[in-house]
């Protein structure tokens, strides 16, 4: 029996996300589709009434059962959505409020804590509104940085990877203005994050020798300094050192050519220099199945690669594909860690 065919010993923890967004309804849809999609058992942290009303708004018939401890989810999951704890809020789709933000924050904090303690095999986070969370005390730029802090890791050690059926891509700089990217790009940054990505693809994705392709920053990858010198000054020296260390790495490649179908066959992950350089191709190719994965942490964490979508919340329009993909990927990653 392979590692991925063995059942997980513990359930996944799912944070509710903003209850006014599409998180609750795509969680309930994922549970309804659990058998067809072969999803591992999971429990949701808080929001039993929110989930019940979100399911009703979507026309789904689901049972909700509160549990007192994560291990109870393994049995309950067969017939009902297990919900840990009694925290709840009013279901107001498309209309975020402070009580919903408090619920979203508590769900995230408790879910991360349970996973860090080993009570859950992995954490899957539904979409949050950073603006609304900031109003109730959330100080981190996003969930990735929060999880690094929660796990006692440096934020530089938490690496965001976007993954779909067609592409895996890592933005080396994330939440910063485009004019700041060049100043933030350093040889050490590329070295550090490429090493984390390389080890994570081995450990969590079962790729024995990951093939890494590195984007250039400038048009035509700088064209020998005609359009910028970051490639010559920063990126190429980093690639050369990593290659000397034994990594299967190439670049810098022109960003406009690296994501073509032919090019994507030649690598397992692309390292992009900034946020949109990674996310635009991923969302163009795999929007409904895109997963945000945090690499470099002692816990497994995934999330659907989309936002709260307040404009369609509660209208039965939200596609649950990315949530299903996030649950499946979390289960596969956790299974590999469990086997090892």
Image (cartoon, rainbow, N blue to C red):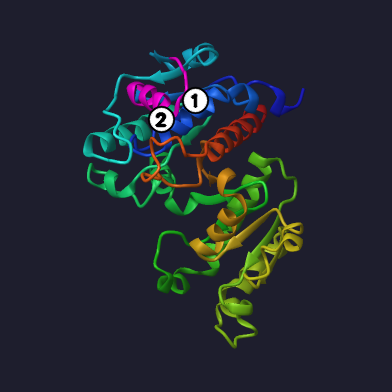
Percent across and percent down for residue 18 are 35, 38
In the rendered image, the vertical position of residue 41 relative to residue 185, given as above or below: above
Identify the residue at image location x=47%, y=39%.
Answer: 317
* Residue assigned mark 2: 111
SS of the residue under disc 2: helix
Identify the residue at image location x=41%, y=30%.
Answer: 111
In the rendered image, the vertical position of residue 168 relative to residue 214, given as above or below: above
Percent across and percent down for residue 117 are 44, 27
In the rendered image, the vertical position of residue 220 relative to residue 11, given as above or below: below
Residue 250 or 11: which is nearer the viewer? Answer: 11
Residue stretch in magenta: 48-63
Left or right, 279 with respect to 209, comes to left
How crowded is the residue under tag 2: few (<14 C-alpha within 10 Å), some, or many (20+)? many
Percent across and percent down for residue 49 are 33, 22
Identify the residue at image location x=71%, y=24%.
Answer: 5
Quarter holding the N terminus is top right
* Residue assigned mark 1: 120
Is residue 4 something that shows in the picture?
A: yes
Q: Compute the Cα span from label 2 to label 1.
A: 8 Å
């Amino acid at each position: 029996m392979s590692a991925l065919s063995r059942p997980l010993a513990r359930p996944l923890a799912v944070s509710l996300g903003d209850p006014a967004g599409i998180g609750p309804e795509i969680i309930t849809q994922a549970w309804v589709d659990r058998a067809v999609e072969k999803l591992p058992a999971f429990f949701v942290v808080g929001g039993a009434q929110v989930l019940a009303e979100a399911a009703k708004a979507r026309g789904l018939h689901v049972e909700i059962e509160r549990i007192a401890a994560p291990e109870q989810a393994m049995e309950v999951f067969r017939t009902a959505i297990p919900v840990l704890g009694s925290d709840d809020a009013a279901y107001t789709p498309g209309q975020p409020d402070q009580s919903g933000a408090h619920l979203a924050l508590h769900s995230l904090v408790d879910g991360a804590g349970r996973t860090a303690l080993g009570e859950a095999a992995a954490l899957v986070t539904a979409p949050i509104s950073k603006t609304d969370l900031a109003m109730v005390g959330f100080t981190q730029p996003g969930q990735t940085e929060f999880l690094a802090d929660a796990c006692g890791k440096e934020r530089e050690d938490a690496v965001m990877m976007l993954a779909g059926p067609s592409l895996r891509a890592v933005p080396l700089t994330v939440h910063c203005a485009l004019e700041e990217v060049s100043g933030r790009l350093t040889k050490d940054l590329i070295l550090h994050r490429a090493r984390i990505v390389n080890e994570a693809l081995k450990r969590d994705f079962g790729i024995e020798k990951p093939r890494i392709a590195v984007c250039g920053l400038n048009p035509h990858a700088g064209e020998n300094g005609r359009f910028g010198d970051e490639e010559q000054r920063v990126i190429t020296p980093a690639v050369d050192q990593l290659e000397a260390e034994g990594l299967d790495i190439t670049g810098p490649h022109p960003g406009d050519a690296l994501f073509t179908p032919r090019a994507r066959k030649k690598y397992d992950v692309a390292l992009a220099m900034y946020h949109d350089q990674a996310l635009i191709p991923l969302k163009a190719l795999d929007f409904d199945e895109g997963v945000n994965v945090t690499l470099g942490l002692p816990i497994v964490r995934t999330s659907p690669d989309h936002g709260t979508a307040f404009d369609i919340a509660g209208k039965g329009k939200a596609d649950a594909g990315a949530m299903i993909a996030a649950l499946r990927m979390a289960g596969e990653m956790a299974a590999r860690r469990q086997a090892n």
